[in-house]
Amino acid sequence: MDSVFLLLIGLAIFSFGYFVYSKYLGSKVLRLNAAFRTPAHEKNDGIDHVPTNKFVLWGHHFTSVAGAAPIVGPAIAVIWGWLPAFLWVTIGTVFFAGMHDLGALWASERNKGRSIGALAARYIGRRGSYVFLLVIALLLLMVIAAFAVVIKNLLMANPSAVIPAWGAIPVAILIGLAVYKLRWNLAAVTVVGVVALYALIFVGDSFPVVLPDPILGMAPETFWILALFVYAGIASLLPVWLLLQPRDYINGVQLFIGLAILFIGTIVAGLFFGNGFVAPMINDAVPADTPGIWPLLFVTIACGAISGFHGAVASGTTSKQLDKEPDARFVGYFGAVGEGMLALGAIIATTAGIQSVARWNEIYSTFSVDGVNAFVEGGGRIVEIGLGLPQSLAATVLATMAVLFAATTMDTGVRLLRFVFQEAGEIIGVKLNTVVSTVIVLVVCVALVFSQGIDGSGGLTIWPLFGTTNQLLAALTLIIVSIMLIRKRRNYYVAVLPLVFVFIAAFWAAILQVGTFWNGGEETNWLLLVLDVIIIIAAVWVAVEGITAMRRATKEPAENEDADLTDHVTGVVPTATK
């Protein structure tokens, strides 16, 4: 089997997931109702709650949840061989991520657009919600800080991506004004926006930007990180329709085109040039520092199979923009499918795109693989062979994809962490306005990023905890979805089975990490050790309370089928933004 067959099989599995399984979930399990009045209409404030065309919202959701993780995770996980990574990405997307993302979006919009952390108070208990918010805040802090470093590294390693990455901002603002203020046709605006983005890619390839050292009295690394946080702070304060939403939408379209280029290049390179795998199907000779495939495969590939961060986005921003409840299937489930396709592309790029077996062995000589650069190198070569694009231009396209994905996740993360701080403030009786909470977020994140030096390496200090924390959060989110389904006497196994598997894998990995961080003496990483233990205790705490709540729900009278429709159904459903 070569890369072409693997690609076609993967796309076929994803098609089954969306056209068959998600239809079952939407109609039979969640019972999405077009007459339900969503929080976007109920609380329409023109800032966070904005009724949105489902295609625009899909773009926002997809690029917000994707980030660099569905590239990095699979690009590292292929060290065990391409087959395990492929199976987890495809099966995980269809039966785990799709249910998780769609379920989290449904649960939130059925509860006035509240975040997963806030829902924990209602369905698990107030004590559990405190712990839930702690886990979410820690996860968002990891994502924001690490992605700032990832983007900085990409911009410095790929100076041709600087112009298209930053040029996407004014393009997005113009799109937002054209769609929401001038009411121009969305399709026409999309075409113009995509053309503008690709024109910027050509300009960037011709005029790479390398910052002088120093710049404004700072090292280039410091300048890029501060510039990214200034942008993310401004983006989190602006109305969602002006920058965040149109930026994510046009990026989503552009990135899907980039994926299409990669996939077409794979087919042409495989059929006409015999381009096949240079990596083993199952690797029996992994480097000495590589951990065991169980359970590390299932936390190394989080985004691209199932990710707790998706639930935070779905309930934090996406649910506040959902125009009609049935749109949740396209936005939530197909958003997960889009990320699975990106993960599939990363697998192919890093196993069939690398020039030779010797080069692959060189890249994968250690478990500490630079996944993004491996993806850019392999994907660029596939596009060069298959479509004849110069490798520099192909690399610019893929590097720009990676930067835009990471940037959209970073700015959404800042907005989400602002919500979490505001919710935490309400719990302790302190009301934080939008500006104050955003400033707190930026101060905390910048302090972490620069805690190890001006190069921003501190942003990766707690990143080793991301995989387990992220997957534990996914399991905890599925507890809430399961409780809601149990109360309604619907098929809750579609949520419980993924919940059990993901919790066991993530909890097992967290326990193994305790041993990794505890080396005894001066080598012990006390920060990561203490945080890992806190995460384990928090997960057990919420899991126990969640299981208790699930058992209690099975004994309670069945919830009225339309209980959560009260005061939320109108005779006329408002028209979506066109």
Image (tube, rainbow, N blue to C red):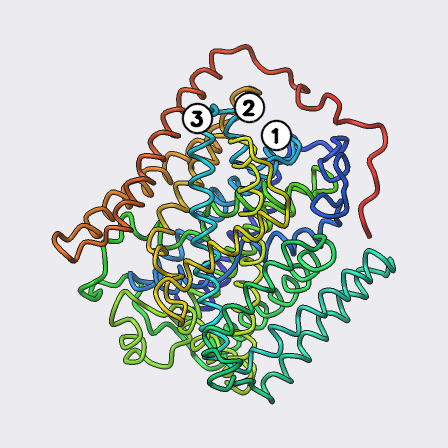
Q: Give the crowd class for mark 1: few <14, some 14-19, many >=20 residues within 10 Å.
A: few
Three-letter residue code for mark 2: Arg
**Going from the N terminus, do you reach mark 2 or mark 1 first?**
1
Q: Residue at x 57, y 78 (%)?
A: 162
Q: Which mark is residue 127?
A: 3
- The part of the image, by quadrant, that contains residue 171 is bottom right
Q: CA distance from mark 2 to mark 1?
A: 8 Å
Residue 149 lies left or right of residue 365; in this view the side is: right
Q: Work out whether residue 493 or residue 508 is closer to the camera in this orientation and state it.
A: 508
Name the amino acid type tagged 3.
Arg
Question: Does residue 506 appear left or right of residue 114 in this picture?
Answer: left
As rendered, which of 508 and 491 lies closer to the eye?
508
Above/below status of 430 relative to 244: above
Which residue position is annotated with label 1? 28
Asked which secondary structure carries label 3, the reply is helix
Which mark sits nearer the N-terminus, 3 or 2? 3
Q: Residue at x 51, y 59 (%)?
A: 67
The mark lying in front, picked from 3 and 1, is 3
The answer to which of marks 3 and 1 sits earlier in the sequence is 1
SS category of the residue bearing label 1? helix
Q: Say whether marks 2 and 1 touch (CB < 8 Å).
A: yes
Q: Quadrant of residue 50?
A: top right
x, y (%) of residue 379?
A: 47, 74
Residue picked out by circle 2: 490
Relative to 202, residue 259 above or below: above
Q: Is residue 404 above or below residue 363?
A: above
Q: How many marks?
A: 3
Q: Do labels 3 and 1 touch, CB within 8 Å? A: no
